[in-house]
């Protein structure tokens, strides 16, 4: 049986942060990352408790391996783990951050989503277009590992996409 994902389709690690701009600056200072501009979109999202429109804000590193910084949205899956849960006291300046997900391209979000569910990764959230799952979906294993799948046709050339969004 063919697995639902391929290692070659892993294209980013997502990190939820309380302030995208602050963390872009911090990761540039400590690791030399260069970034896309901070992108924003109000997207219809399906969550366990129903559909909502959420203000997503995010940026990608131009440098591989790619990092996606995602602005925290309290009360949604885009919330960082509490540092106290990890045995670390809260940080007043930097806030809570956590590796949030592994992002994979796929050719068919609904089909890949179904296969991930069959493999023990229940659907957590997805974008909705015309009432149907589209663009991306998040799957969360009981162990806490979160997978994001993104429709490959949305970003057919990752390098070109990142360069077109480069921060000036």
Image (cartoon, helix red, strand yellow):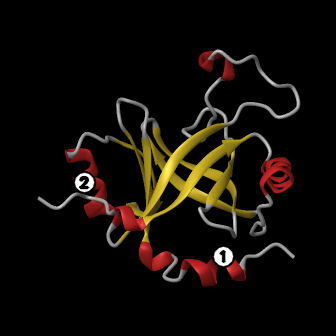
Residue 38 coordinates in the image, percent (x, y): 77, 63
The crowding category of the residue bearing disc 1, from other C-alpha atoms within 10 Å (few below 14, some 14 to 19, many at least 20), is some
Q: Is residue 135 left or right of residue 106?
A: right
Q: Position of residue 76 (x, y in %)?
A: 57, 37
- Residue found 67% across the figure and 22% down from its top: 83
- Residue 105 point in image, percent of width and height: 42, 67
Q: Is residue 15 above or below residue 137?
A: above
Q: Residues within 10 Å of mark 2 (few under 14, many from 20)?
A: some
Q: Looking at the rendering, which quadrant does residue 32 occupy? A: bottom right
Count of numbered marks: 2
Q: Is residue 24 above or below residue 167?
A: above
The structure residue drawn at horizontal position 78% and vertical position 31%, both measured from the top left corner, is 95
Q: Position of residue 128 (x, y in %)?
A: 45, 59
Q: Is residue 151 left or right of residue 3?
A: right
Rendered residue at 69%/64% (across/down): 61
Q: Nearer the viewer, residue 3 or 58?
A: 3
Task: Identify the residue position indicated by label 1 in the image.
Answer: 162
The residue positioned 64% from the left and 57% from the top of the image is 68
Image height of 72 relative to 131, above or below = above
- Cβ atoms at labels 2 and 1 below 8 Å apart: no
- Could you tell me which secondary element the residue under label 1 belongs to? helix
Numbered badge on residue 16? none
Picture quadrant of residue 140: top left
Task: Give how far apart the Cα atoms at labels 2 and 1 are.
Answer: 29 Å
Q: Secondary structure at mark 2?
A: helix
Q: Closer to us: mark 2 or mark 1?
A: 1
Q: Quadrant of the N terminus?
A: bottom left
Query: Which residue, given by chain and number where applicable, does mark 2 sit on?
Result: 114
* Farthest left residue in view: 1
Residue located farthest toward the front when viewing the structure as drawn: 31
Whichever of callouts 2 and 1 sits on the residue coming sooner in the sequence is: 2
């Amino acid at each position: 049986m063919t697995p639902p994902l391929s290692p070659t389709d892993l294209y980013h690690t997502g990190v939820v942060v309380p302030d995208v701009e602050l963390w872009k600056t911090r990761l540039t200072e400590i690791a030399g990352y260069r970034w896309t501009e901070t992108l924003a979109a109000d997207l219809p999202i399906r969550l366990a408790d129903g559909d909502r429109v959420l203000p997503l804000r995010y940026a990608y590193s131009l440098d591989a391996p790619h990092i996606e910084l995602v602005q925290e949205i309290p009360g949604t899956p885009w919330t960082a783990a509490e540092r106290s849960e990890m045995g670390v006291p809260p940080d007043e300046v930097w806030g809570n951050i956590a590796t949030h997900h592994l992002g994979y391209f796929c050719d068919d979000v609904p089909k890949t989503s179904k296969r991930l569910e069959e493999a023990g990764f229940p659907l957590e959230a997805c974008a909705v277009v015309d009432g149907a799952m589209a663009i991306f979906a998040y799957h969360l294993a009981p162990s806490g590992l979160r997978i994001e799948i993104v429709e490959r046709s949305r970003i057919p050339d990752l390098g070109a996409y990142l360069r077109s969004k480069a921060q000036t």
